[in-house]
Image (spheres, grey):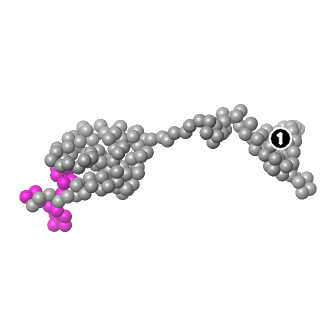
Amino acid sequence: MFVRAQKSGKRTYLLIVENDWAGGKVRQKVLHRLGRLDILQQSGKLDALILSMQRFSDKLAVLGAAESNQIQTGQGCRIGPALIFERLWQQIGMDKVLTELLDNRNFGFSVERTVFLTVLHRLFCSGSDRSASRWKNNCRISGVENIELHQVYRAMGWLGQPLGADKQFGATPFAPRCTKDQIEKR
């Protein structure tokens, strides 16, 4: 069963028809004539008919209810990345290493959580620190809800901070050893 438009002169009519097999051929059987298309559209009766019919359809009833604010739609968030890699992060002791190195620093925010956020972001979708700051809004990662972009920049700056001259053993001639090298060593 479906709706078919039928032209008659300059006018178009809407019909509800169904296909029938008769004598090995498909024949269309008109079940109901809805009327002239232009009049149905102008009067709003076509829209009213469609809306009233959609409540009998499981799929369209949900769409119609969401559109008319009868149900609330929510925003989904990813939980898998943090669940898997949080455990690995703790098993290798990365949280403890960072906490130890940050013991004498007073950043005013969790640098460990910020570094975890950027590592997780780079594992799942490479991108900039700005991108990581936006990406966290669609994921459930404990401790990063209030981290702002400037804090991500500060944490990354700390990772790239050169170590003192006494800790430059093994440095390449191109770049000095920095905090991230100390973390990798531990």
Q: Residue at x 87, y 42 (%)?
A: 33
Magenta stretch: residue 147 in it? no
Q: Quadrant of the N terminus?
A: top right
Task: Please name whichever residue, 13 or 43, is drawn nearer the observer in this view of the structure.
Answer: 43
Residue lying at the far left of the rendered structure? 166
Give the vertical position of 186 relative to 168 (above or below).
above
* SS for callout 1: strand
For residue 125, say whether it is visible: no
Q: Quadrant of residue 23?
A: top right
Q: Residue at x 23, y 42 (%)?
A: 95
In the image, taking residue 35 as reference, residue 74 lies left or right, namely left
For residue 146, say whether it is visible: yes
Residue 151 in the image, given as x and y percentages of width and height: 30, 52
Q: Quadrant of residue 150?
A: bottom left
> Residue flagged by tag 1: what amino acid is it?
Ile
Task: Please name whichever residue, 112 or 45, is drawn nearer the observer in this view of the structure.
Answer: 45
Q: Residue at x 30, y 56 (%)?
A: 153
Residue 160 in the image, given as x and y percentages of width and height: 22, 58
Residue 180 in the image, given as x and y percentages of width and height: 21, 53
Magenta stretch: residue 176 in it? yes
Q: Residue at x 19, y 54 (%)?
A: 179
Task: Please name whichever residue, 145 or 167, is drawn nearer the observer in this view of the structure.
Answer: 145
Give the vertical position of 162 relative to 71 (above or below).
below
Q: Quadrant of residue 64?
A: top right
Residue lying at the far bottom of the rendered structure? 174
In the image, taking residue 47 as reference, residue 186 lies left or right, namely left
User: Which segment is the magenta one?
Assistant: 166-186
In the image, taking residue 78 as reference, residue 152 lies left or right, namely left
Residue 24 in the image, given as x and y percentages of width and height: 85, 39
* Badge 1: residue crowd in 10 Å (few <14, some 14–19, many ≥20): some
Q: Which residue is mark 1?
A: 16
